[in-house]
Amino acid sequence: MHKIDGLIMAGGRSLRIKELGEKPIIRLNGRPLIDYVLKAMSESKLIKSIHVTVSSHTKNTTDYLKRVKKYHFQIVQTPGAGYIEDLRYAINLSGMSDVLVCPADIPFLRGKLLDLVVEEFFRVGKSSLVTVVPLEMVQSLGLEPTTIMKIDELDMVPTGVNVVKGEKLVTGATLDEGYFKVNRKEFAININSRRDLKIAEKILKKSLKNSTHKIYEPC
């Protein structure tokens, strides 16, 4: 199995949760959210390098990342023009090919779960793979999705964890999109509001109480 690059998007404005500060460094159980994603990518067996995008919107995040010594990654300064624009800029600047893209606000991911996404990308063979979870799962957690997609007559929610062929994205070529439907709550919990953070804290505390070895047990 080929290895690919990992890219964490951490340069957005995070307007829906701005009152708590820059989203990547909002703390969950005493740790910045981005730490959880860095750990997951570091655990992955199919991610060969890790890049993190930052921008003028996330100066505190940039300062924090410069102090992190536990994980090996490269900081990529982007214009902060928007998600797609910054994604394209980072991929072009770093010369990445196949790229697993992940937001900085999904704290329950694990390396083995990211590996499943990479494996599915190569299995499907399309230029883009979008990971989605059932709407019903998101709602069962008390979370409110920002986007709902109809896939094979099912209501699904994009997780933000995607794989893309970088050269096609950079050139503006039309992407042949595939979907990876996963029934794993680890993909469903991202932090877009104070309420989301409280739900994540509750889940994490329950997990820590039940196990001293794993932060989150799959449901």
Image (cartoon, rainbow, N blue to C red):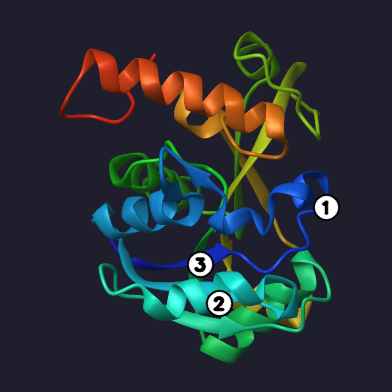
Residue drawn at (70%, 18%), measured in percent from left and top?
135
Distance from label 1 to label 2 (Cα)?
18 Å
**Front position among marks 2 and 3:** 2
Identify the residue position indicated by label 2 in the image.
62
Res 144 visible:
yes
Closer to the chain start, of discs 2 and 3, is: 3
Badge 1 amino acid: Leu
Distance from label 2 to label 3 (Cα)?
15 Å
Give whichever of 35, 88 is nearer the camera.
35
In the image, residue 118 above or below residue 189:
below
Is there CB contact under 8 Å for labels 2 and 3? no
Looking at the picture, how far across and down is residue 162, in whole percent? 57, 51
Give whichever of 105, 65 is nearer the camera.
65
Identify the residue position indicated by label 3 in the image.
7
Q: Judging from the image, what secondary structure is the residue with disc 3 in?
A: strand
Residue drawn at (43%, 45%), measured in percent from left and top?
117
Q: Judging from the image, what secondary structure is the residue with disc 2 in?
A: helix
Identify the residue position indicated by label 1 in the image.
15
In the image, residue 183 above or below residue 63:
above
Residue drawn at (70%, 24%), measured in percent from left and top?
156
> Could you classify mark 1 by the number of other residues whose Cα lies within 10 Å: few (under 14), some (14-19), or many (20 or more)?
few
Looking at the picture, how far across and down is residue 119, in whole percent? 37, 47
Query: Image check: 6 left or right of 21?
Result: left
Residue drawn at (62%, 86%), measured in percent from left and top?
92
> Could you classify mark 2 by the number of other residues whose Cα lies within 10 Å: few (under 14), some (14-19), or many (20 or more)?
many
> Could you classify mark 3 by the number of other residues whose Cα lies within 10 Å: few (under 14), some (14-19), or many (20 or more)?
many
**Front position among marks 3 and 1:** 1
In the image, residue 33 above or below residue 174:
above
